[in-house]
Image (cartoon, rainbow, N blue to C red):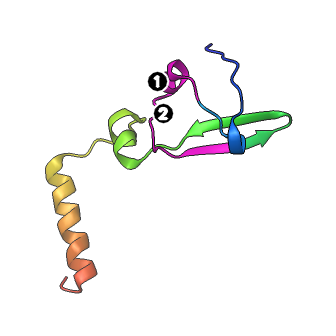
Amino acid sequence: MIEANVRIGKRRTLVIPKKIAENLGIEEGMRVNLRVEGDKMIIEPIRDAIWLALHGKKVAKVTLKELEEESFERQKELAGTS
């Protein structure tokens, strides 16, 4: 477990220590989810689709050809030319 004591700055700004940010993959500009549970504040990174595709749990295997075919069909449906 990584732990750090930090000071709250002006306008209640919280700076996440580099070691913790790196451990969680939090980068500047990234969005996080902030919630309160009892007397604790929980900060969790919000993962975008690219991060999830590269690092997230895999639930199915899709080939590039299958992905392209599905994309082409959906585009035809949306364009009304199916």
Image x and y of residue 45, in percent: 54, 39
Residue 2 drawn above or below residue 64: above
What residue is rendered at 25% in x and 46% in y?
62
Q: Which residue is mark 2?
A: 26
**Alpha-carbon span between mark 1 and mark 2:** 6 Å
- Using the image, determine if residue 31 lies above or below residue 80: above
The kind of residue tagged 2 is: Ile
The answer to whether 41 appears left or right of 25 in the picture is right
Query: Do the numbered discs 1 and 2 sit on residues whose CB atoms are within 8 Å?
Result: yes
Q: From this view, report whether residue 50 is shown above or below residue 82.
A: above
Range of residues picked out in magenta: 16-34
Q: Residue furthest top?
A: 1
| Numbered circle sitting on residue 61 | none
Direction left: furthest residue: 65
Q: Nearer the viewer, residue 25 or 67?
A: 25
Where is mark 1, residue-wise?
22
The residue under the point 19% across, 45% down is 63
Position of 44 with respect to 7 (left or right) is left
